[in-house]
Amino acid sequence: MSTIILKKHRDQFDLLERMLNSTTLTTQRVTHRHILKAGEGVMKENFIDVDGEKAAAVREALIAADKRHGRELKAACYKLEKELEEERTRALQRQQRQLTWDCTKIAWIDHFRKFTKEKEEALAQQWEEAERLKTIAVQEACEKLQHKVRGQFIIEREKAVAEALTRARLREQETIARTQRECAKQAKEEAEKVAEQHAKEIEKREKRYDSLITKYQKELQHKARVEQDFMDLQTDYKRFMDYTDSQFHSDYMMRLRCHGLGLSNKRVSLITYEDVKKFDG
């Protein structure tokens, strides 16, 4: 056998090996029998007495391609599982931040109600103190007036003062009653407004909480389905390896159960829970 023929022989097998290595899981596979027939046809056109070396080269190329695709499949599955776990962690963190904010909001509302109550108590104390000071001032004014009202017409002046005080007291009582009514009305309106806002805020937060719980349950269900599909795929692959001839078994004879998903055409980072459906058993 000449040197030129040997070189040409190696080039043909290199071409076949490159063709095998350049395929992916979504490429239409052919059986080992077709690969061997195609290799034999190519080799017979160029040389004759190289059957043993040809078969060894084809087997080596098939074994190398099988190992490479096995590593790629394992790496892709590991990367997908890692990204799904990271996405779940981020979702839980977002939910935790939202719940923390909701708790802070409720605490702020309770603080506002406490502040309003303390303010009302302080106003009541100030009102009582003002009444006390006013009473003292009136008493002092009366005493000063009594000291001045000496001599002629003392009784008439005292009567006039008494009438003036009575009228002033009536006007004061009317003013106090009117002020109390206005304050009570305003306080009632404010309390109703605060209660309505509080009820709306609680309803809004409850709806938000229900929405988060629903979303969380969906995320858990999606995660469980993806994990179950992954375990089913591992079991199916092991069963395939157990029932396939050890000399020719290869990933080239496998297809996705749910034909048409096209998951292998996508990058792993783009595959979502909606894309990964449960495989047909």
Image (spheres, helix red, strand yellow):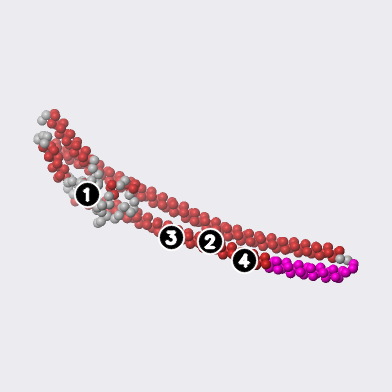
Q: Distance between the residues labelled 1 and 3?
A: 43 Å
Nearest to N terminus: mark 1 or mark 3: 3
The answer, for residue 275, to whether it is visible in the render is yes
Q: Which of marks 2 and 3 is in front?
A: 2
* Circle 2 residue: 197
Badge 4 is on which residue? 185
**240 vs 279, nearest the viewer:** 279
Tell me which numbered mark, 4 or 2, is placed earlier along the sequence: 4
Q: Badge 3: few (under 14), some or many (20 or more) residues near its Cα, within 10 Å?
A: few
Left or right of residue 122, residue 242 in this image: left
Q: How far apart are marks 1 and 4 (CA)?
A: 80 Å
Q: Residue at x 14, y 40 (%)?
A: 39
Decide which of tag 1 and tag 2 comes sooner along the chain.
2
Of residues 167 and 238, the one drawn nearer to the viewer in this rendering = 167
User: What element does badge 2 sit on?
Assistant: helix
4 or 3: tag closer to the N-terminus: 4
Residue tagged 3: 210
State the residue position of label 1.
254
Q: Quadrant of residue 173?
A: bottom right
User: Mark 4 to mark 2: distance in Å?
Assistant: 18 Å
Give the percent coordinates (x, y) of residue 190.
59, 63
Tell me the magenta residue range.
151-177
Give the percent coordinates (x, y) of residue 18.
21, 38
- Dot 3 amino acid type: Asp
Q: Do the residues labelled 4 and 3 touch (CB within 8 Å)?
A: no
| Closer to us: 44 or 99 | 44
